[in-house]
Amino acid sequence: MSYTVRQATIHDLDIVVPLFDGYRQFYGKPGDLELARRFLHERLQYQDSVVLLAIDEEGRGIGFTQLYPLFSSVRAARTYLLNDLFVVPVARRAGVAVALMREAGDFARAMGAVAMSLSTAHTNTSAQRLYESLGWKRDEHFREYNLPL
């Protein structure tokens, strides 16, 4: 399978929206293309996030990852949260996720980031194997907490 990875722009919404909707459905949310479009449009319009997009040789979106800029007070430096990673089922096991992850790392380094972070479901063992194969380390020192609002 031949594909390219590049940074998406607001002009790529028609390609990214179905991927983002598929990602949300993977995590148990109902399909909602309008919600996906609105959310991504805002992120790209206000430059709240960076979307990296994998496109096949026919111009179809086959995967994406979304990065959110953060800062570490302790390190006094920029970091990125890799919040979303999704590859369509027909393109899985073709190296697309690896290419997206590597491009994300390259992007973060180019922006001067000192680290990237992510979280995944405890049951998503295939993603955990991918992350660990690329050098990501599971945090053994801190617990992550969330406050539902």
Image (cartoon, rainbow, N blue to C red):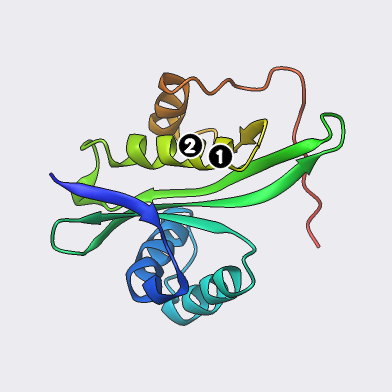
Q: Position of residue 88 (x, y in %)?
A: 28, 53
Please tell me the numbered disc located at residue 8: none
Residue carrying label 1:
110
Mark in front: 2 vs 1: 1
Please tell me the numbered disc located at residue 106: 2
Check the picture and name the quadrant holding the C terminus.
bottom right
Q: Where is residue 5 in the image (x, y as percent from the top left)?
A: 32, 49
Q: Where is residue 138 in the image (x, y as percent from the top left)?
A: 60, 22
Q: Is residue 20 left or right of residue 122?
A: left
What is the CA distance from the residue labelled 2 to the residue labelled 1? 6 Å
Q: 1 or 138: which is nearer to us?
A: 1
Q: Crowdedness of circle 1 by 10 Å Cα count: few (<14), some, many (20+)?
A: few
Q: What residue type is labelled 1?
A: Ala
In the picture as drawn, the residue positioned furthest to the right comes out as 74
Q: Which amino acid does label 2 sit on?
A: Asp
Q: Where is residue 71 in the image (x, y as percent from the top left)?
A: 77, 43
**Quarter of the image where one finds residue 23:** bottom left
Secondary structure at badge 1 equals helix
Residue drawn at x 38%, y 71% as measured from the top left: 12
Q: In this view, does 1 lie to the left or right of 103?
A: left
